[in-house]
Image (cartoon, rainbow, N blue to C red):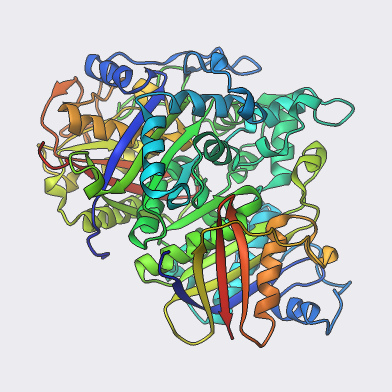
Amino acid sequence: MSTPLALCITGIGAWAPGAPDWQSLQAIVRGEAAATDDAPARPPGTILPAAERRRAPDGVRLAAEVAAQATGMAGIDPATVPCVFASTHGELAITDYVCETLAQSPLELSPTKFHNSVLNAPAGYWTIATGCTGASSAVTAHHRTFAAGLLEAAAFACAEDTPVLFASCDVASTGPLAEMTCTTLAFGMALLLRPAAGHGVRLNLALHHGAAEPVPPVTMPAVAGDNPANAEALALLSLLAGTKSSNLRLPLSSGLSLDMEIEP
Amino acid sequence: MPERIEPLAIAARSATSALGHGLAAQLEALRSGRGGLRANDFSSAPLECRIGRVAGVEDAALPAPLAHWDCRNNRLAWLGLQQDGLMDAIAGAIARHGATRLALILGTSTASIGATEDAYRRLDHGRFPEDLQRPEIHTPHSLAAFVADATGIAGPALTISTACSSSAKVFASAERLIRLGLADAALVGGVDTLCDSVLFGFHSLELVSKQACRPFDAQRDGISIGEAAAFALLERVDAAPHAPRLLGHGESSDAHHMSTPHPEGRGAQAALDDALARAGIGADAVDYVNLHGTATPRNDEVEAKLLPRFATRTRASSTKGFTGHTLGAAGALEAVFALLAIEHGIVPPNLGCSEPMPEAAPWLALQPSPQRVDVALSNSFGFGGNNACLVFGRGAAA
């Protein structure tokens, strides 16, 4: 058994249709409020310069929005923070566009949509907007994207002794691909992780050699849709919205799980 | 500056590219200056360019229990895993450490999107055709999930997809997991296959040459796209003391533009600085640099600005004239080339360049040459200004 990774969370960002920030999502999770009907349909992503924001697909705006919320709450300059952006499927609407265009008239593929199709588009736009010159990454692990991505970000923070921004975001799918991807709603969250003890919520991570039961389907389908990574992210956020120490075990593989211990 | 890290042994490695299947084929081609590019016979509509296509991918059928993973990218991964005793080396590491103590971190830019493209060409009343109704291959994690299933690795499994730096960054992530004791060994690598998305996508950006690519040539006019599978098994040095070693890694972001590099190579310089610091060496200790060298006018111009960091005895080359730009597989493929340089005392030539850029000429190796290489470095730069640099060194004398 490996030594647990000791971290603290000093910033949290969240965005879902009807829950435009962590504060409103927290109220929904606690049962104190319902999803708002008048929330914007697209994440604003106002940290992106206007020209970039016009070009940016929804997944980029979503990632930029939650990342800016988390770094803002932590009071840290994003230019100095390495970042890990996790996504189960990347820009699903762009993938749908690219595959449809390739099937119909491949020579008409849009160059902007092509460069927006890479899984690291959010990391690219984010580092350009914030002037971040540190390491940036884009990771995925299908149904284990949230747990595997969080482990990657936490390992970076502890190995390099640096704050790390972790974001997990997926947008709704469109077109024939939708049937294959189980992602009906946009949902994104971000955490500013710091290694070792400090102010903020303590988060201890350890590997458990044994299988874990998958997190049950999202209890708030109106907020997070049916993407398993969203369900896992929401499970952690629900604990972070509470006031007591708590634990969560998420599957990493058929024989390995990630144990999370949270101390507010 | 980061602190020096403990080196890791490259206990096993292999590569499969347009040069052939396995290490011997790569070595023979690099030694003789025989390139693997050919006229494009792949895209679903005609496109005038040269490609680095791997022979025999279509025939690399998956065994029945793995058949639900079938697609071109996973066939190439399977073909790559059968070379150079890799499967035995992985089984040995699992026996030594336990399946959950091996991490699996692979890089890819498009994974099995070729299968998704195929489904869109063959839609059945607006739905995917029955043979492609397999959600597990319509995800960017398809490759790593397949390799986990095929090898029995049951530790942390992750796909890194940062375009053309993807499978260089996997070495850094694996080193951190092993340093922290979260894994005892890691299979890293990269697999990307030819598909319409990249052929027509890079064409739309006007980055594809009609000829075989000419890295660092004054007349260079774009990339040739290729495909490859490359893998490395990382373990602590005591497990394989004579094997070559990963000495250092560096990662950075340009914070400049989505599809063109920072004009002064700011991010590339930072990645190089960090990689050398983790290796605990200066640039003067580097014998061979495998350059990213895509043969686009901008990449090579910016990358050439790094070369004055090295002594003029340091030899440098891009190997993309041999294999094409293998995108998400390039980092791992070219890491294997750097390892071949160390193990076999060769400097691969910068194939395709007849009129070298003056800024790069003092360092460029234009002809294959035998030379002792103790320290080799590999650069990988991707879309979105995503940079990675790896440093490899020689193992203990036998």
In the figure, residue A177 lies in which quadrant? top right
Q: Give me the residue at 59% from left, 68% from top.
A: A67
Q: Give me the residue at 82% from left, 26% from top.
A: B123
In the figure, residue A23 lies in which quadrant? bottom right
Q: Give me the residue at 82% from left, 67% from top.
A: A220
Question: Closest to the observer: A115 or B278?
Answer: B278
Q: Quadrant of the N terminus of chain A?
A: bottom left
**Residue B296 appears in view:** no
| Residue B253: percent from left, percent from top | 42, 56
| Residue A11: percent from left, percent from top | 57, 78
Q: Residue furthest front?
A: B95
In the figure, residue B274 lies in which quadrant? bottom left
| Residue B271: percent from left, percent from top | 32, 53
**Position above or below: A193 against A112:** below
Q: How many marks?
A: 0
Q: Quadrant of the C terminus of chain A?
A: bottom right
Question: Closest to the observer: B351 or B286?
Answer: B286
Question: Closest to the observer: B375 or B175?
Answer: B175
Q: Is B350 on the left or on the right of B261, as rendered?
A: left
**Position above or below: B311 against B47:** below
Q: Is A77 on the left or on the right of B3, as rendered?
A: right
Q: Give me the residue at 44% from left, 71% from top.
A: A5
| Residue A136: percent from left, percent from top | 46, 57
**Position above or below: B267 against A41:** above
**Residue A16 appears in view:** yes
